Image (tube, rainbow, N blue to C red):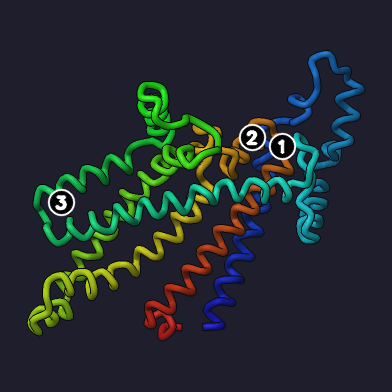
Amino acid sequence: MRRYILQRLWQGVILLALVTTIVFFLGRLTGNPVDLMLPEDATEEDRTALIETLGLDAPMYKQFGIFVVNVLQGDLGVSHRYRRPVVEIFFSRLPNTLKIVPAAMILAMIMAIPLGIVSAVRRGSMIDRVSGTIAVLGIATPNFWLGILLIYVFSVQLGWLPSARMGTPLHYVLPTITLGTFLVAGFMRLIRSSMLDILDSEFVKLARIKGLSETTVVWKHCLRNALIPVLTLWGVFMGGLVTGAIVTETVFAWPGIGRLTFEAVIFRDYPLLQAVIIMDAVLILLINLMVDILYAYIDPRIRLAE
């Protein structure tokens, strides 16, 4: 087990180095931040002075070398826009994202598990077809369109729910539904597929021969085994929710990591953009490592393979 964890950690270090390199060079393709920071009446001397202050006058390879040395020392820089350490900004926004991620995940699991099980047990029925339609719509519907539609219906037309920002518990409803819709579709289809494979397995037939009730067979024996691949998908989705809620947070003006990433790109804030993506990558690696460890404990075949 220790060797398994060390191998995953080493792979994570290599991946993090690649992410750091890519984000440094791709970030600079968005343009020069000086063009956005200076007023229209700024002189060429003002432009040159600001470029030197930001350290953008050095050759690209020197900038990258300085960046790597600072990262190894735990210094990800200071935001051009906020004039604050980027790590401090990241962790000030992270709790806001973590407030809606668990709610979206819980909503998805509450809806997806029963729908997936019923669809598998009653394969080909009306419930199965309706669930399949829900899954297709959930996967195909863009988050930004769904968010805008929910705002129009429940905020503008009905006036039941607030349309943006944080505040009361009602502010969490629309962002949670927007984030959770895609998860419901993904989890439901995976649970249905896993349940169908397990329902046809030999140990399920044996359990039925022994006289166990169908409820016990489905909810105790089948579901437990069907959740093993779901655990892997949970890790992928959780990382994506924490780091990829850019569209949802932008639509609802939610001050989280996703909106912070959007702001970093729009204002060409290189240090902030680099820090957000690197910290996002670290979070994803930690979540996946946790899932790998849980997976190894749940499925002993992984430890035996090692």
Q: Secondary structure at mark 3?
A: helix
- Image coordinates of residue 166 in percent, x first then y, are 55, 38
**Mark 2–mark 1 contact, CB under 8 Å?**
yes
Foreground: 140 or 257? 257
Foreground: 137 or 22? 137
- How far apart in space, not on screen, are marks 1 and 3 (Cα)? 48 Å
- How far apart in space, not on screen, are marks 2 and 3 (Cα)? 42 Å
Of callouts 2 and 3, the N-terminal one? 3
Asked which quadrant contains residue 235, the reply is bottom left
Would you call the spot at circle 3 few (<14 residues within 10 Å), some (14-19), or many (20 or more)? Answer: many
The kind of residue on which mark 2 rests is Glu
Q: What mark, if any, has residue 128 been given in the picture?
A: 3
- Image coordinates of residue 216 in percent, x first then y, are 18, 74
Q: Is residue 48 left or right of residue 32?
A: right
Q: In the rendered image, which residue does mark 2 sit on?
A: 263
Picture residue at 56% right of the left edge, 83% below the top: 2
Q: Nearer the viewer, mark 1 or mark 3?
A: 3
Q: What mark, if any, has residue 91 been given in the picture?
A: none
Would you call the spot at circle 2 few (<14 residues within 10 Å), some (14-19), or many (20 or more)? Answer: some
**Mark 1–mark 3 contact, CB under 8 Å?**
no
The kind of residue on which mark 3 rests is Asp
Of callouts 1 and 3, the N-terminal one? 3
In this picture, is 116 found above or below 166?
A: below
Q: Is residue 250 left or right of residue 208?
A: right
Q: In the rendered image, which residue does mark 1 sit on?
A: 269
Would you call the spot at circle 1 few (<14 residues within 10 Å), some (14-19), or many (20 or more)? Answer: many
The kind of residue on which mark 1 rests is Asp
- Image coordinates of residue 203 in percent, x first then y, are 17, 80
